[in-house]
Image (cartoon, helix red, strand yellow):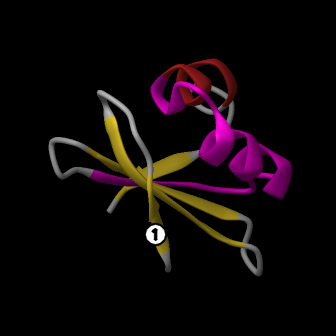
Amino acid sequence: MEMISVSSSNVSAVGYDSDTSTLQIQFNDGSLYQYFDVPEHIFDGLRTADSAGRYLHQNVKGVFRYSRV
């Protein structure tokens, strides 16, 4: 999955697979998570947010199923 670097104190890169609606997040500590059944507009909002970490916390965490990769 192609990853896009983001400027964040917590998140280093984000990626999205439109075929499976999977959002992938790489955190600055190196951990990698995938969130499932995420609409593409959520990814678009995340990659353009002023704060990727805040957007992730408000719109993704606790909303979508996830797995650490």
In the image, residue 7 sits, relative to residue 2, either above or below, namely above
In the image, residue 45 sits, relative to residue 43, either above or below, namely above
Q: Position of residue 48 (x, y in %)?
A: 66, 42
Between residue 60 and residue 65, name the one nearer to us. 60
Q: Residues within 10 Å of mark 1 (few under 14, many from 20)?
A: few
Circle 1 sits in a helix, a strand or a loop, which is it? Answer: strand
**Residue occupied by mark 1:** 3
The residue located at (75%, 56%) in the rendering is: 37
Is 37 inside the magenta-drawn segment? yes
Q: Position of residue 22 (x, y in %)?
A: 64, 64
- Circle 1: residue type: Met
The residue located at (64%, 33%) in the rendering is: 49
Is 56 inside the magenta-drawn segment? no
Q: Which residues are magenta?
A: 32-53
Q: Position of residue 63 (x, y in %)?
A: 68, 30
Q: Position of residue 47 (x, y in %)?
A: 61, 47
**Quadrant housing residue 17:** bottom right
Q: Residue furthest left?
A: 29
Q: Is residue 14 left or right of residue 35?
A: left
The residue located at (72%, 75%) in the rendering is: 20
Q: Quadrant of the C terminus?
A: bottom left
